[in-house]
Image (tube, grey):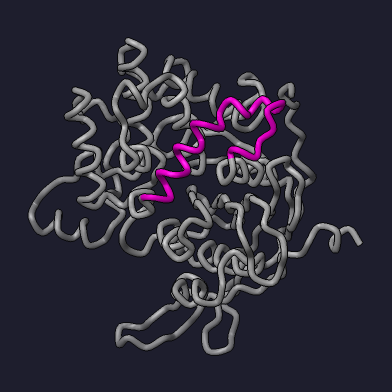
Amino acid sequence: MAPRTPAKASRPTTPPVLVRQVRNGVVESVHRGDIVEADVSGKVLRAIGDPDRVAFLRSTVKPFGLVALLRAGGRTEFDLTPDEIAIMASSHSGEDIHVRTLQALYRRVGVAASALACGTEGMPLDGLTAARLARDGERPSPLRHMCSGQHSVFVLLAKLGGWSPDGYWEADHPAQRAYAETVAAAFDVRPGQLRTGIDGCGIPTYAFRLRDVARAFAMLAAPEAVPATDGRAVLAPHLTVVRDAMLRHPELVAGTRERLDSALMKAAPGRLVSKSGMEALRGVGILTGPRTGTADTRPTGLALKVEDGDGYDRGTYAASVEALAQIGVLDAAAVRALARYHRPPSYDPHGRLVAEAVPEFQLAPVGELAG
């Protein structure tokens, strides 16, 4: 199958309300957004809002970009283990478990952590770890940055290719070109058609429609479902390695505390793979298997974007859990286990519950929307 020409974004529309912040019966604020579920072919199955909404991938790109290193032979060359692969697909919390995993990799392959150019500002994400470092007067190293796993992909690509790691974050560096070519392949476009920007950690990022994001995550969920005639099929073996590593080590994909990507994969083990990005984007790959309330078992992908960027995370969290519950991937037990994300609470200094973020939307089958 030849690469397709990216469709133009639809005319901007006001997204529907997904989540309401409610305090003592009064709606204080709302979070609007768009959600789409699609299969491996790109067929939209369920949606609310605009499936053609364009968003930068930000960190949701990581499982796909990592394939550049695997395609180049990095798994064999560096004897990469599943935990190392998982953390290179991560936006980790900067806990000790994440740092130790990266340190072991760097020692084994003979690379200095000083090669990382992701910075340290605002890191680590994990509050307890940050408090401990501050108490001990320890400054966080770049290894504690949430994107240090992704940046390690570029450093290892440079080592593998015999290129200098200097300036690896620049778009014209060979490591960045290899990464971009792989992202283009995963989204079935030509590299020259990529719409780019600069991510918060200083590297290029890429913009796609939500339907394209959902399609890519459906492929991540079930790489074997991509037809041999589809140009993306060459990525399938490598995506399987990435998916399985993320499923095996969910705590390395995000963190051990208060991170929804990890919590989702733990609540529904072996059923979904989740990866968030800044500005309230989340992609979820839903593996083949039974769902509650439906006979549908096919693999799909879900893409969700909250319009306001969701600085508190509550809108993205609530909408993500609700959407996955509505399509039957999360059963009642899983939803209960995820209660603090499903209806994120707000407490006062005395521990009293004073407000909740309440998801209120219906993710309708596309046939019903068309009718």
Question: In terms of depth relative to the viewer, which is nearer, 71 or 302?
Answer: 71
Measuring from the top left, give residue 110's x and y in whole percent. 19, 22
Question: In terms of depth relative to the viewer, which is nearer, 286 or 225?
Answer: 225
Q: Per the image, is 227 magenta?
A: yes
| Residue at (19% x, 26% y) in the render | 112
| Residue at (49% x, 31% y) in the render | 238
Up-down relation of residue 228 to residue 263 (above or below): above
Horizontal side, residue 267 vs residue 10: left or right: left
Q: In which quadrant of the rendered view does residue 87 lie?
A: top left
Q: Residue furthest right?
A: 371
Measuring from the top left, give residue 328's x and y in whole percent. 63, 67
Residue 148 in sight: no
Horizontal side, residue 225 vs residue 10: left or right: left
Question: In terms of depth relative to the viewer, which is nearer, 351 or 292?
Answer: 292
- State the quadrant of the C terminus: bottom right
Q: Per the image, is 124 magenta?
A: no
Up-down relation of residue 178 to residue 32 (above or below): above
Measuring from the top left, give residue 67's x and y in whole percent. 47, 30
Measuring from the top left, give residue 264's x and y in whole percent. 47, 61
Label total for image: 0
Q: Which residues are magenta?
A: 223-248
Up-down relation of residue 304 to residue 188 (above or below): below
| Residue at (73% x, 58% y) in the render | 47
Q: Residue furthest top?
A: 162
Magenta region's main secondary structure?
A: helix
Residue 355 in sight: yes
Horizontal side, residue 193 vs residue 346: left or right: right
